[in-house]
């Protein structure tokens, strides 16, 4: 993930402000808030500025994914190569959905909140949509998960762990 963050900061940083780079990274799948906070730290953006930028960037895609992903996937499946891609994405999400099923709210919250590869708001929204989870419940769980991820990644990205332990 660090190499992707460096790529985005170096490439986009030539054209837009450091804050805009962090915002874009936070909206991007895979990187999301986790990558945004890493980038903000690398770009020396103060944590008080970085956190709201990353949270807003990470939240923006959620309603669109929850509301439209099934229709988009249905349309994409009409095309051979895109259909295969959709099948792989759905398979990936459904393999991870076991962590969410049964305890939907808590499971989705922890899935989004614990910063592990392949987790986050994008995949969480996809799983919630594929499981036909109530949208209000899914959004609330994901917002709680983003809050958890923010705390964890702030500690990691800004070296606050040393300050907490002392």
Image: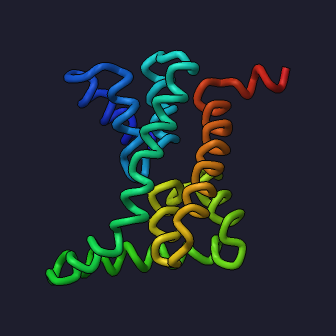
What's the residue at 51%, 32% (across, down)?
Answer: 37
Left or right placement of residue 49 versus residue 86 in this view: right
What's the residue at 61%, 63% (across, down)?
Answer: 137
Q: Quadrant of residue 147?
A: top right
What's the residue at 67%, 65% (across, down)?
Answer: 105
Left or right placement of residue 135 versus residue 102 in this view: left
Q: Residue lying farthest left? A: 79
**Between 52 and 11, the one nearer to me in the picture:** 52
Q: Residue lying farthest front? A: 136
Residue 88 in the image: above or below residue 29: below
Residue 131 in the image: above or below residue 160: below
Residue 153 in the image: above or below residue 41: below
What's the residue at 33%, 81% (across, down)?
Answer: 87
Quadrant containing the N terminus is: top left
Task: Give the image location of residue 75, x and y in percent.
Answer: 21, 77
Left or right placement of residue 146 versus residue 5 in this view: right
Colour convention of the picture? rainbow
Q: Residue lying farthest right? A: 166
**Between 134 and 57, the one nearer to me in the picture:** 134
Task: Give the image location of residue 22, x and y in percent.
Answer: 40, 30
For the image, the number of numbered tags is: 0
């Amino acid at each position: 993930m660090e190499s992707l963050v460096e790529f985005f900061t170096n490439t986009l940083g030539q054209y837009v402000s450091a804050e805009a780079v962090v915002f874009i990274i936070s909206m991007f799948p895979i990187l999301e808030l986790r990558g945004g906070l890493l980038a903000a730290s690398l770009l020396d953006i103060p944590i008080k500025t970085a956190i709201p930028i990353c949270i807003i960037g990470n939240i923006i895609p959620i309603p669109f994914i929850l509301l439209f992903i099934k229709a988009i996937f249905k349309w994409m499946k009409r095309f051979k190569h895109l259909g295969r891609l959709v099948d792989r994405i759905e398979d990936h999400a459904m393999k991870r959905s076991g962590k969410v099923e049964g305890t939907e709210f808590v499971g989705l919250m922890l899935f989004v909140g614990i910063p592990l590869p392949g987790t986050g708001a994008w995949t969480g929204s996809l799983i919630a949509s594929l499981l036909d989870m109530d949208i209000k419940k899914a959004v609330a769980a994901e917002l709680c998960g983003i809050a958890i991820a923010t705390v964890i990644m702030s500690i990691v990205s800004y070296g606050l762990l040393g300050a907490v332990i002392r």
